[in-house]
Amino acid sequence: MNRIKILPETIVGKISAGEVVERPASVVKELIENSIDAGANSISVYIKEFGIAEIKVIDDGEGIPSDDVILAFQRHATSKIKDEKDLQRISSLGFRGEALYSIANVSKLKIITQYKDEDTGTEVYLTGGNLVSEKPVVTKGTTVEIRDLFFNTPVRRKFLKSSYTEKAHIIETVQNYCLAYPEISFSLFIDREEVLNIPQVKTLYDRISQVFGLEFTEKLKFKTISKDNYKIELFLGGEELLRKSKGRQLIFVNRRPVKDFSIVNTIYKAFHINENHPQFFIFINLPPEDVDFNVHPAKKEVRFREPQIIHQLIFRMSEYQVKSSMIAEETNQWKVNADLSSISQISAFYTESIFNKEEIFHFFSIGDAIVVIQRVDGIVFLDFHAAHERVNFEKILNKMSEQIVKLTFPHVINLNPQDYVLIKENLHILNELGIEAEDFGENSIVIRALPEIIKYIDIAGMIENIALTLKEGTSTPDFIEIKRKIAATIACHSSLRANEKINHFEIKALLQELERTSDPEHCPHGRPVRKFISLDEIKKWFLR
């Protein structure tokens, strides 16, 4: 009996779909790419129930010839690759011939299309990849309707995240192509609500302004460089856009959104960014034969023939751009109930005594956020940032309703559409944490009150990080768990930062507060706060 068998086409189709169609946003991505390759000037996307119920993409591109419509849904069917040499110089977005085939295998699909040079078009309906009906129509461009996504692969549905997380991925996908193609107009409707309406513009700067707002775009520094057939355009956020966690860091290679950690690292090094994370948009254009998009099923990663050229150009761009102000970090002093104005701050390896009634011990700082404290029975390594996070986390989680501060002037925060959807649908969680927030419309929220402990921090940056936390939610979000994650994000923003100097009064107050928490050994993210090494253990090192 043969143990090795040839899989039936139905299973092969579902395996292929699993590689290409990870989530509803994957379908949106593939259909938008097809519309762009068809020469569309306008693309509209309609979503119902975060893409599970319906995804509809309408474009005014050249359409599909009637003889090719059925063929387009066969495996490895493409009009963009003719021979092996074409794989070495890919200039189109879709080239694998897997997208329509894979999508059709896990959905109920209808396509209405008419080729620009034909008098009639074609309407085709498929279920699970099987042809149900075909008839002639008169239309313009192409409309693709996807319904009941993953209806025949229920396991795939179980792996989807929460509804607002899936919506955020869809918005992010459309935004990315908006940025890469300013000459195309885009619109996005989710459950009949208009989320994006982006007309055609002439420049990348104008398109970034459309998507993220002029106020944000004016804080970006622009630099461009060209060499031979390579061109790089970089929009880099200045000091005021630095964040404690990675936010908008978008890379486009030949107008395709990709991920490439080496490019990210090069930007950090070239612009001497050591603290926090910058926000940037980088657009790289190079000869198609110098880049390989065929290294990932969803074309998210690339391989460059000569990556050193790109890295060298980024360093050259930084030569006249980097300024000390770009990497400076605005810090907020941690307040304790004492007048510390006359207390000098400690520097690395400078020791001070801390006196209390029972013992005398010394401390000194090492590294960025580590303090070494001497005790009678040994030494303690304390991560003061992590310790302060734990203290603030529990204060915030308990809401501190008696310490809510009403803002004299309500703070309006403009968000990009993706973050706006996430925050708007979870305002109740913010209010549970003592952040009195309301929907203000037009991708904005208004903050009317805050816990005392966070009233001085970068509120906009904190809200963006909260949106990122929500985006990482699960398919069955646990309210308490989400609340804890958001409280941890807020605590991180309001805590002492690495490289901040801390004096002995602050350490003493911090240690006392830490002992009153439910878990003084770990920060809210689970990292250890302190490590004790006994004197007996130290003596053993020296065989004493």
Image (tube, rainbow, N blue to C red):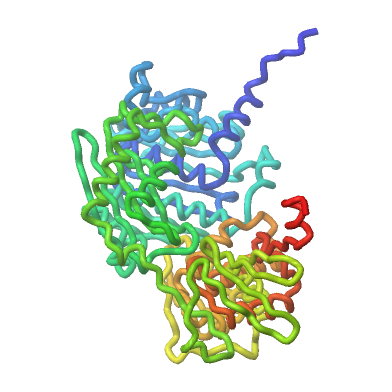
- Residue at point 66% right, 83% down? 355
**Residue 65 placement (x, y as % from top left):** 36, 28
Which part of the image, by quadrant, shows the N terminus? top right
Q: Is residue 197 left or right of residue 523?
A: left
Above or below: residue 137 compared with residue 508? above
Which part of the image, by quadrant, shows the C terminus? bottom right
Residue 374 or residue 56, whichever sits in front? 374
Res 525 quadrant in image: bottom right
Above or below: residue 174 compared with residue 73? below
Above or below: residue 523 compared with residue 118? below
- Residue at point 51% right, 47% down? 25
Callout count: 0
Residue 374 seen by the camera:
yes
Residue 422 seen by the camera:
no
Q: Is residue 131 left or right of residue 360?
A: left
**Residue 96 placement (x, y as % from top left):** 45, 27
**Residue 310 placement (x, y as % from top left):** 30, 39
The residue most toward the right is 1
Residue 480 or residue 96, whichever sits in front? 480
- Residue at point 51% right, 42% down? 27
Q: Is residue 461 left or right of residue 283?
A: right
Above or below: residue 406 compared with residue 187? below
The residue most toward the front is 544
- Residue at point 63% right, 41% down? 150
Residue 142 or residue 461, whichever sits in front? 461
